[in-house]
Amino acid sequence: MRVEFLGGVRTVTGSATLLEKGSLKWLVDCGMFQGGEELEKRNWKIQPYQAQNLAFILLTHAHIDHSGLIPRLVKEGFRGKIICTKATLDLCEVMLQDSGRIQEMEAEWQNRKGKRAGRGEAIPLYTAKDAEKSLRCFEPVSYDEIVPLAEGLKVRFRDAGHILGSAIIEIWVEEEGQERKLIFSGDLGNSHQPIVRDPSIVEEGEVLWLESTYGNRLHKSKEETVQELLKIVQEAIAHQAKVVIPAFAVERTQDIIYTLGQFIRRGALPPIPVYIDSPLAISATEIFKKNSDCFDRETQEILAGGENPLDIPGIMFTRTTEESKAINEDSRPGVIVSASGMCDAGRIKHHLKHHLWREASHIVIIGYQAEGTVGRRIVDGAKTVRLFGEEIAVKAHIHTLGGFSAHADQKGLLDWVSHLRNPRLEIFVNHGEEKISVELSQLIRERFHFKTSVPEWREKRILFSEVEKGIPEREVYPSTPRSEDQGLPSTRAEAEGLRVDPEQRFFTPPSKAGLGAGERVEEELLPEEPLSVLLNRLDRTYKRLHRKLKREKKKGEVVSHPGWWRQLAEAQQKLEALEKEME
Ligand SMILES: [Zn+2]
Ligand SMILES: [Zn+2]
């Protein structure tokens, strides 16, 4: 079967993997790229997702970096089914429409700017209406149930313990009469997280996609984190100050409500105003209450005791902008929880503008801050940050509390992997910043001796093929990663070219080739290979080589590498000879 890594590789956003078995194609996750203009350009290049040809999208969970491109694919003609858990569907209902509204606002803002600069009209990636339409394709399944999807294809969703409804997906595929098993870890939760259960253990499988968000870090224990939060809130109360917590609307906000609730229920804190200032977080909290069957035992027990784990005295849910603005007039000490979690959009920006410069205020960062976001700059110790076109001094107390993470840390990931028993397991390490994924990949290889790698964006692989055996990876799978600047194939032939099966592309029957051992077979091309494919490959190889050489030249290393000189000179000669022959 074929695989193409469409996102969430060497970055934490845009999770998507295309799988193909014969003519059956499906995606696992369909996430939006976030974190900088360069990366976000990829959201517009969705031909490789083959929207119209997909039978399914298997969705691990509702976070936008996994689900955010679904409405776009539906808009482009996706008519298959989106399979996920019920809680994921409920969350997607609010999250995708919210994302659509953000896209609309973004386009509007671009247009206001663009008009002044005389540029053409910007259109949203998708609208709230598009998002609503995409909900029709969703088909919820239960945890732990094996669901046949097509001839030779079954799946099972297991609790990933990351956010409400999140899943590890197990996929059984029949290949050449043999059943094979793939595992997608999705985002793996942190054990002992509030509300949700711990991640399920998986023991069997042949190929694993493993997330690595915190693959190089160890979180503080949850107990330590909870105590730290308590101390911060107590200090704020003593100084009549506020605690501002940027939090993802889903899961993290509910975790904070739950934890503050525990403080108040146990008498460690007096009832104080707690503002939940994010319409999305408010809707998500309602969905949590509706899906209490997903709660862990501790949370179930609070429910059974007649209390609501997501309601605390003094909690205020602010939906309207007026209510949100009124928070600033409340001079009492209290807690403001607002989105977005990475501080680069939404109402949190207003609260940061009000509190970052105040020495008595506390800003508590509890989630992952991607490169390029306002949150990351605050965590990295910036003296000022830019909000609404204004430089704001950072004078408040800044705290980073890792223990609230909804992701397993390095130890959690290694523990989870340690349950896998197949010594021939192959692992693709994904969903992490490049350096971190590479580090985790090496660590797993050393510790468990599994075959691991960190795929590139747009790289393709063949799984379970005979061809795979005995031939070095590089030669079987010439990577087809393309840098963003190269864009997409402009013609059908080019597009087809990108999908040519490596078996057909690179193997000449031995009788014809007559190659000796060790000779490179991948240079041989089948005569029927279309010229456009050949040109396309040549073009890409040339560009890649050119870029690499340019980089080396900057470092001054090319001069000290005689092997390269020789090979480049030979290549030049061969090209000249070919040119002559064609005349
Ligand atoms: Zn997630
Ligand atoms: Zn994620």
Image (cartoon, rainbow, N blue to C red):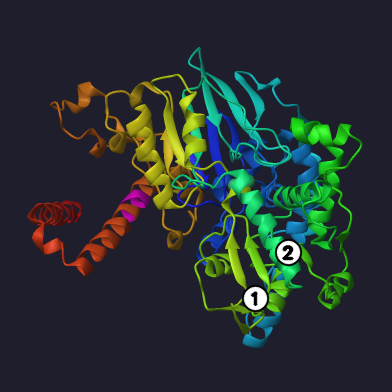
The answer to whether residue 406 is visible is: no
From the image, tell me which residue sits under label 1: 356
Q: Position of residue 293 (x, y in %)?
A: 81, 31
Looking at the rendering, which quadrant does residue 16 occupy?
Answer: top right
Q: Nearer the viewer, residue 190 or 176?
A: 190
Type of amino acid at the residue the image marks with label 1: Leu
Mark toward the viewer: 1 or 2: 1
The image position of residue 277, as x and y in percent, is 80, 63
Badge 2 crowding class, 10 Å Cα cut-off, few under 14, some 14 to 19, many 20 or more, is: some
Residue 99 image-quadrant placement: bottom right
Q: Is residue 212 visible?
A: yes
Q: The residue tagged with tag 1: helix, strand or loop?
A: loop
Tell me the residue at 61%/30% (across/down). Answer: 169
Amino acid identity at mark 2: Ile
Vertical comparison of 145 with 533: above or below: above
Q: Where does the magenta region start and end?
A: 535-539
Query: Which residue is disc 2 drawn over?
Result: 102
From this viewpoint, which residue is outermost toward the bottom? 116
> 383 left or right of 232?
left
